[in-house]
Image (cartoon, grey):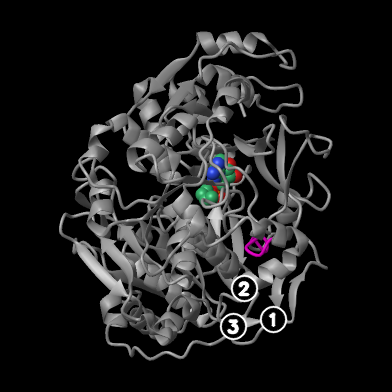
Amino acid sequence: MSESSEQNQSNESREERRFEPPDDLAADANVTAEAYDRAAGDRLGFWAEQAERLSWGKRWDTVLDWDDAPFAKWFVGGTLNAAYNCLDRHVEEGRGDRVALHWVGEPADDRRTLTYAELTDEVCKAANALTALGVEAGDPVAIYLPMVPEAVISMLACARIGAVHTVVFGGFSADAIVTRVTELDARVVITADGQYRRGDPSGLKPAVDKAMESCPNVRTVLVVKRTGQDVEWDDDRDQWWHDAVDGQSTEHEPQQFDSEHPLYVMYTSGSTGKPKGILHTTGGYLTQVAWTHWAVFDLKPETDVFWCTADIGWVTGHSYIVYGPLANGATQVMYEGTPDTPDKDRWWRIVEEFGVTLFYTAPTAIRACMKWGDSIPQRCDLSSLRILGSVGEPINPEAYIWYREHIGGNKAPIVDTWWQTETGAMMISPLPGVTAGKPGSAMNPLPGISGQVLDDEGKEVPDGSSGLLVLTEPWPAMLRGLWGDEERFRETYWSRFEGKYFAGDGAKKDDDGDWWLLGRVDDVMNVSGHRMSTTEIESALVSNAKVAEAAVVGASDEATGQAIVAFVILREEAGDGGEEIVQELRDHVANQIGKIARPRQIMVVPELPKTRSGKIMRRLLRDVAENREMGDATTLTDSSVMDQIKGGMSDGRSDDD
Ligand code: WT7
């Protein structure tokens, strides 16, 4: 919330810009304004109607059981199969020939098209293969794959047999695999030999091989052949995907699972060192991801082509590449590589090639495209685009306007969607045929979602003021807990305000009552829309023998939203910190957590500013990192500390990656 005063100043002029829904879209929208009233009058009835859009083995008896709050049960007594809902039912209803995935590899001519019928067959084969490997309902399976169709196939194969997948983002290091596999006690891991990134094959299996040294319980590693590069092989443990899957039958009877059967665990950074395993279950989750995808993107499954650029390793990929769009029978694009390979127009060439109509990406990507210049998207025909989505961090008005003008041709509305790994699905967003858009505002909670902005005492702030974002009623896709840690679940989300879910975000309602998200209020950073914990990176730094103490802050950064800046005190024997050690520490963090966690800047300092109770004053460090005048430092034990810091800084700054 560090920029809030700046934000307040310019909000006035921002709020003047208002884009009404285009007439043609409004006339034919999936959802009308009536949905807000309907949901406000009967929230559970509204969600039950949305659940009817799915196919259930047995219908539920009770929409919501909240007796054991904060542990919710949705659609109690109902049974369903998530994969059947995403696949077979479309085939059975005559949509088998519709394209489910237009997959685009990074190398120029790499394409693979899978219809709903073909994807169903692939998932059935993979489900049979997993069963043959001894995987049963409730068993965890770890997935560490690039953006290839097998990532979708693996997830749905797990869902089909009731196994609980945990997808580890391919940018994370071996350690991230170890912690997840160990915590869940996964016995099967699915990976690939490698992937294409920036024009070259790069390895994935080596990280798994390294992780497996610390995961003795894993009995099988299934390996998708993607690049054909040389890999080490353990005959007792490793199996090629094509050997295990290709020969399997395409027949597989999907079993119906309880509505609350676990679907997946997704790890995300919290404000303490250890990542949290967010648990999602089946019926409520699928209901809300399907409905929000259909409503917020006004999906017309017969004609639309949807493209979400997120990686499958994040919740956005789970909810809006796999479960939401496929439950809706959508046709979508899935792309393996980076937006600038071989050239900076790669994304727009893909939009043109497939006639993408609905596009969903993150503000950091839009800002990168802005920097590359207006002439790049002008090379391509983008006239098919009719709705543009944004997710992951607040979208600054400049990026919003550029996105609207240069990608959306000033006609496609922008939906800025606020949600979290924990919420499972979109929570605050415009409805493009109903709500106006304001650059920088996510507008209103969706129908069926109840939120408030509170002050520190828990009182609602008046319109025009900012405070803390809470959700006041349970919602179908909400997390059902943190894996194996009930206490942390209560403490993190439900203890700040009695009976309300505390999201960790600041928010403001403007004079029209529209919502503006102001960023995290805890020790969680948002770097390029990726969530990183300051303390997790601090722990990584102090695990290096040369570091005595470390403090990490998220400094505002034009390109990435926030950037990681670390302050370290070295141990005496490490010397006084030249460029070499700074480089070593940056690499150390990349090895411990992953490249995305590598600090932009590491400052070697003699001292860190602390309160009397010994808490590091990150706010002051953020000021230093952002080169601002420093705020009030009277609670420092020794206020000369900051002068020392500024004086004795050895600044290791790096602009690579
Ligand atoms: C945090 C959640 C939602 C999937 C991707 C990130 C920030 C997310 C927005 C938005 C402002 C946003 C919040 C939130 N955030 N979307 N539209 N406007 N901020 O999921 O990794 O769980 O991160 O991302 O700070 O708490 P995540």
In the image, what residue type sits under mark 2? Answer: Ala
**Residue at point 52%, 42% (across, down):** 20
**Alpha-carbon span between mark 1 and mark 2:** 10 Å
Residue 618 image-quadrant placement: top right
Q: What is the C-alpha distance between the residues marked 2 and 3? A: 9 Å
To which residue does mark 2 refer? 51
**Could you tell whether 153 is left or right of 372 in the image?**
right
Residue assigned mark 1: 60
Q: Amino acid at mark 1?
A: Trp
Q: Would you say the residues marked 1 and 2 are in contact, meaning their CB atoms lie under 8 Å apart? A: yes
Q: Residue at x 69, y 81 (%)?
A: 60
Viewer-proximal residue, 450 or 421?
450
- Asked whether, in this view, residue 56 is left or right of residue 252, the answer is right
Q: Out of 118 and 156, give the one closest to the viewer.
A: 118
**Which secondary structure, mark 2?**
helix
* For marks 2 and 3 on the same chain, the one whose residue lies earlier in the sequence: 2
Q: Where is mark 3, residue-wise?
A: 56
Density class for disc 1 (Cα within 10 Å; few <14, some 14-19, many ≥20) is many
Identify the amino acid type marked 3.
Trp
Find numbered disc 1 in the image and state the secondary structure of the residue it sits on: loop
Residue 233, percent from left and from top:
27, 69
First to last magenta residue range: 475-482
Q: Which image quarter holds the C terminus?
A: top left
Q: Where does residue 441 sit, x and y in percent of width and height? A: 57, 38
Whether pointer 3 and pointer 1 mark residues with C-beta atoms closer than 8 Å, the reply is yes
SS assignment at label 3:
loop
Residue at image x 65%, y 26%? Answer: 616
